[in-house]
């Protein structure tokens, strides 16, 4: 039985899709559809995803319907998704640049759509300053679909909320540069150290950040890192076993302290790379 019509009625099951943490083990592919837990903002979010397609952005799944037991069905987006430890193809400059370009396209379409102020959008990873468009807020490798080495779609819009474009770019930078100290990066990004200042410039150029946004970006990345730490802390405090395990495996709160110190220490270097 469906709530809003359109989604075929079949029991949960199918091919389990790996990746992600919030809905780990609860997302399934059933032919051309993905069956997953629906976010509480599903009605507004589904309307937004459909409007994005009408405004020419085809880099997101289309909602098909919701079920009476709190799940949603969306079109399956074929392609490759990079999972840790991330493969070499996901760490190329061309892959990074394609993420920036796709994010710019998403924002261009989103800017044409009004954000419903009556919706209680999730604040978990949202821009504390708010903003003019609905940001994705979680452009991590798990949520980007690639074809032939280039980003073609974003998935998992559960944490979407109003914000500034530079906030979404900063969130993406955390994962795709990555904006991590070398010790933290080595565990997830094998194959040698990545040149963070240079890669940050690649992302900014491919997105087309303005001079003002480039000047703001390093500090906004620090802000997003603090928000992400609070996100993890809340889930650990709630007893979430996945987040507790990952926190322990990746060095605990000492790692988060190290990352924040590294970002602050190198802020001037990142700013110079973006503005030169």
Image: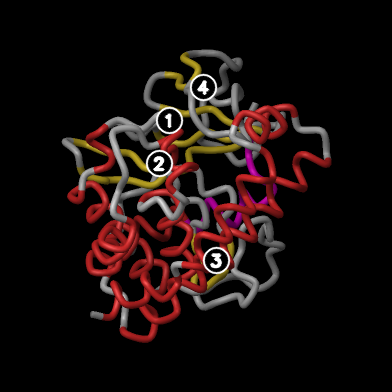
Tell me which numbered mark, 1 or 4, is placed earlier along the sequence.
4
Q: How far apart are the alpha carbons under marks 4 and 2?
A: 19 Å
Q: Which residue was labeled with disc 2? A: 141
Residue 204 horizontal side relative to residue 252, left or right: left
Query: Which segment is the magenta one?
Result: 37-48
Q: Secondary structure at mark 2?
A: helix
Residue 96 higher or lower than 118, as above or below: above
Q: Which residue was labeled with disc 3? A: 222
Tell me which numbered mark, 2 or 3, is placed earlier along the sequence.
2
| Residue depicted at 29% across the width and 62% down the height | 203
Residue 30: give x, y in percent of width and height. 45, 19
Tell me which numbered mark, 3 or 1, is placed earlier along the sequence.
1
Marks 4, 2: nearer the viewer: 2
Q: How far apart are the alpha carbons under marks 1 and 4?
A: 20 Å
Q: Which residue was labeled with disc 1? A: 84
Residue 218: give x, y in percent of width and height. 45, 71
Tell me which numbered mark, 2 or 1, is placed earlier along the sequence.
1
| Residue depicted at 68% across the width and 27% down the height | 245
Marks 2, 3: nearer the viewer: 3
Residue 156 horizontal side relative to residue 195, left or right: right
Marks 4, 3: nearer the viewer: 3
- Crowding at dot 3, Cα within 10 Å, few <14 / some 14-19 / many 20+, comes out as many
Q: Pick the quarter of the image with the N terminus.
A: top right
Q: Secondary structure at mark 4?
A: strand
- Crowding at dot 4, Cα within 10 Å, few <14 / some 14-19 / many 20+, comes out as many
Residue 77 horizontal side relative to residue 113, left or right: left
The answer to whether residue 68 is visible is: yes
């Amino acid at each position: 039985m469906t709530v809003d019509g359109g989604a075929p009625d079949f029991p949960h099951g199918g091919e389990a899709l790996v990746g992600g943490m919030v809905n780990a083990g609860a997302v399934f592919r059933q032919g051309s559809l993905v069956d997953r837990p629906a976010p509480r903002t599903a009605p507004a979010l589904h309307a937004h995803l459909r409007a994005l397609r009408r405004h020419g952005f085809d880099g997101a799944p289309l909602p098909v319907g919701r079920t009476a037991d709190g799940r949603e069905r969306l079109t399956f987006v074929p392609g490759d998704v990079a999972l840790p430890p991330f493969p070499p193809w996901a760490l190329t400059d061309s892959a990074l640049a394609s993420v920036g370009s796709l994010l710019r396209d998403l924002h261009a379409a989103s800017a044409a759509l009004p954000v419903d102020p009556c919706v209680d959008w999730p604040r978990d990873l949202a821009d504390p300053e708010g903003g003019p468009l609905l940001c994705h807020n979680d452009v991590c490798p798990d949520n980007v679909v690639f074809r032939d080495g280039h980003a073609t779609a974003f998935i998992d819009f559960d944490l979407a909320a109003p914000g500034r474009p530079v906030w979404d770019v900063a969130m993406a930078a955390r994962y795709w540069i990555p904006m991590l100290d070398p010790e933290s990066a080595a565990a997830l990004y094998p194959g040698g150290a990545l040149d963070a200042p240079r890669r940050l410039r690649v992302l900014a150029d491919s997105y087309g950040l303005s001079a003002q946004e480039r000047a703001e970006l390093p500090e906004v990345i620090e802000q997003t890192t603090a928000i992400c730490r609070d996100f993890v802390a809340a889930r650990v405090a709630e007893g979430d076993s996945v987040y507790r395990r990952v926190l322990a495996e990746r060095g605990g709160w000492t790692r988060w302290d190290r990352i924040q110190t590294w970002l602050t220490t190198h802020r001037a270097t990142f700013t110079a790379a973006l503005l030169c």
